[in-house]
Image (cartoon, rainbow, N blue to C red):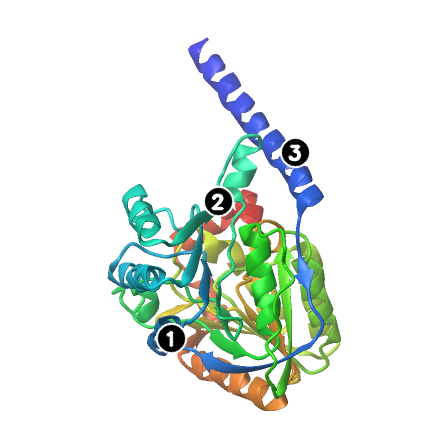
Amino acid sequence: MIFTLILIFIAVIILLIILDFKLGRKDHLSKQRAFSFEKTPGDYIFYINGAPFYEALIQDIHDAKEYVDVLFFIVSADETGLQFLDILKRKAREGIRVRLFVDRIGSLKITKKIRQELREAGVQFKFAEVPRFPYFFYKLNRRNHRKITVIDHKIAYTGSYNIGNVYLGGNADFYDWRDYHFRVTGPVVANLQKIFSDDWGDTDTNEKVPQTKAPHDLKITATDGNQLERQLIEMITMAEKEILIGTPYFIPTKKVMDALTSAIARGVHLHAMIPLKPDHPLVREAGLPFLYKLFRLGATVSLFDAGFYHAKIIVIDNTFADVGTANFDQRSMFLNKEVNVYFYDPAFITELRNAFMIDADDSLTMDEQWIRKRAFTIRLKEQIAKPFLPLL
């Protein structure tokens, strides 16, 4: 009798979670806010290592004269994170408007004490995507995964780095941490400011456009849980020769997988790269069966083994590149808020492709022997992960 009651209780909880998720999804879609701007002039500096990015960001914040707007998924409460918060507090005490926006779950370690110190210094602080009723379980999985900093209408940063020791190579498990981040200037800055302002909740998002010349066209796209799948399919479909995909998590939908298999069938070479060592339970194993299939169709699969590969990059035919915060997974496609940048400059795309290939040289290459000899624990996790694909 007790066992039966326990089973009934578990079944009711599962049904309530499913109902919460479905109703939460419906509510999300009715309120989603996404941006896809036209091509806009801009210039950029490309960072593939955390230290140079962090030094440049700190210097630009130090030089700010009007305001600093900061949005990160994660700001850690470690040495690097606290140093970053200190510079924000110093700028606020100078009379500069400073707004700090971090994801509620990603930046869970930003404690009440830290928040109080920020506010006492004059920093305007908010958490993004705070889980609330109704639809608590769904909102718990809804994350603002964007990384945007805008300074004085003139300079913006976006990409996939967060703030913390691990991103500077300060973690013994991962050694070098590979990410891509950009410092952008020119009129394109206004587009990133608009995304930040909308996330923050500004009622007036008519942003000042920098009146500076810029040599390149960029396109900023900010997705909100319902646009990314279509965008990925469009990118894959336009490929004629080569598709490079670098991502920490490779968990495509059926539609995206079909687009990839169709590309291979028409003679496009697909090269996908993921980290050999995962940073979260099940995420690697959830993606491996998709990669086995693509490998057996002729794709190259690289397993980065020189640290942790956290970059998110797609290069098509050396003529188009997409870099940003969106992972190649269903969470980014249907749950997260993301921001990505499209690049069209052939010289820069060649630089991105070369960076990808250098990392591929520091990787293991998947082959039948690797698949056949993979550990029992990997095989077991591959099966365990199947029901959780939309949440990974």
Q: Position of residue 348 (x, y in %)?
A: 56, 87
- Give the amino acid at mark 1: Asp
Residue drawn at x 59%, y 60% is 195
- Is residue 290 visible to the viewer in this orientation of the structure? no
Q: Nearer the viewer, mark 2 or mark 1?
A: 1
Residue 384: image tag: 2
Report, in whole angstroms, how far the alpha carbon at label 1 lies from the one at label 3.
46 Å
Q: Residue furthest front?
A: 95
The residue lying toward the viewer, choosing from 342 and 382, is: 342
Choose top left, top right, bottom left or bottom right for residue 98: bottom left
CB-based contact (under 8 Å), mark 3 and mark 2: no
- Give the amino acid at mark 2: Ile
Report, in whole angstroms, how far the alpha carbon at label 2 lies from the one at label 1.
50 Å
Q: Earlier in the sequence, mark 2 or mark 1?
A: 1
In terms of secondary structure, where does tag 3 sit? helix
- Is residue 319 visible to the viewer in this orientation of the structure? yes
- Please indicate whether residue 19 sits to the left or right of residue 282 in the image: right
Q: Which residue is mark 1?
A: 63
Q: Position of residue 186 (x, y in %)?
A: 58, 79
Q: Position of residue 50 (x, y in %)?
A: 36, 73
Depicted 2 relative to depicted 54: above or below: above
